[in-house]
Amino acid sequence: MIEFELGNLSIKISEEVFEKMKSFIQDENHKPEAGGILIGHYLEDNNYSITDVSSPSEFDKSSRFNFTRSKKNAQKIINTIFKDSKGKKIYLGEWHTHPEDYPTPSGLDKKSILEQIQGNILNSEIIFMLIVGRKGIYISSVEKNGIKNSLNINYDEINKISLDILRANLTKN
Ligand SMILES: [Zn+2]
């Protein structure tokens, strides 16, 4: 589990989810952008947990510098997960890769994430935009009136966070 603070929010991402997104890192010239949706729980007191991510599907459009996910397919995934979890797992935003070491969102990225939260009825008032770069991730919280807090975390730090948590758990037991 990777855990970090984003403004006044506390976010957890499961190791499995993280590895899944990292498997699409654009570390070679021919690899296209990849992406999907973030799914998880809103726990009380500004705590969020990202437990699932969707992978690119054949319905998405993707090139080296662009990724447009299929609306229909994503909605299907959201509906299925919502139903299977009895409403506990909800849509929490979008992820995609960038062919840069430390990613920053493009103008189009910002525009489309705002369209997501402004144009749809969602189960969460806050969603996240996560971009997977070659050496780190960018994540921001997004509300109806704009992009709020953002954070860059590099993979070295994440490995260290995981190790620290692992060590803390070992000490506890
Ligand atoms: Zn982008």
Image: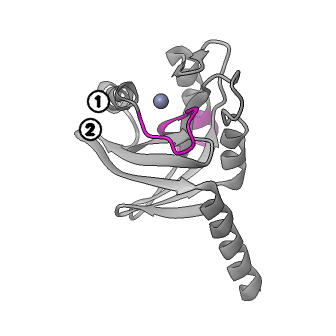
Magenta span: 81-105
Secondary structure state at the residue bearing disc 2? loop
Query: Label 2, on which residue?
Result: 144
Q: Residue at x 69, y 34 (%)?
A: 24
Q: What x and y, as percent, mark residue 38?
A: 54, 39
Secondary structure state at the residue bearing disc 1? helix
- The dot on residue 45 is none
Which residue, as the protein is rendered here, is positioned at the far left? 145
Front one among 145 and 131: 131
Q: Amino acid at mark 1?
A: Gln
Q: Are marks 1 and 2 in contact (CB under 8 Å)?
A: yes
Q: Which quarter of the image is occupied by the N terminus?
A: bottom right
Q: What x and y, as percent, mark residue 55?
A: 66, 29
The image's colouring method is one colour
Query: Label 1, on which residue?
Result: 118
55 relative to 129, above or below: above
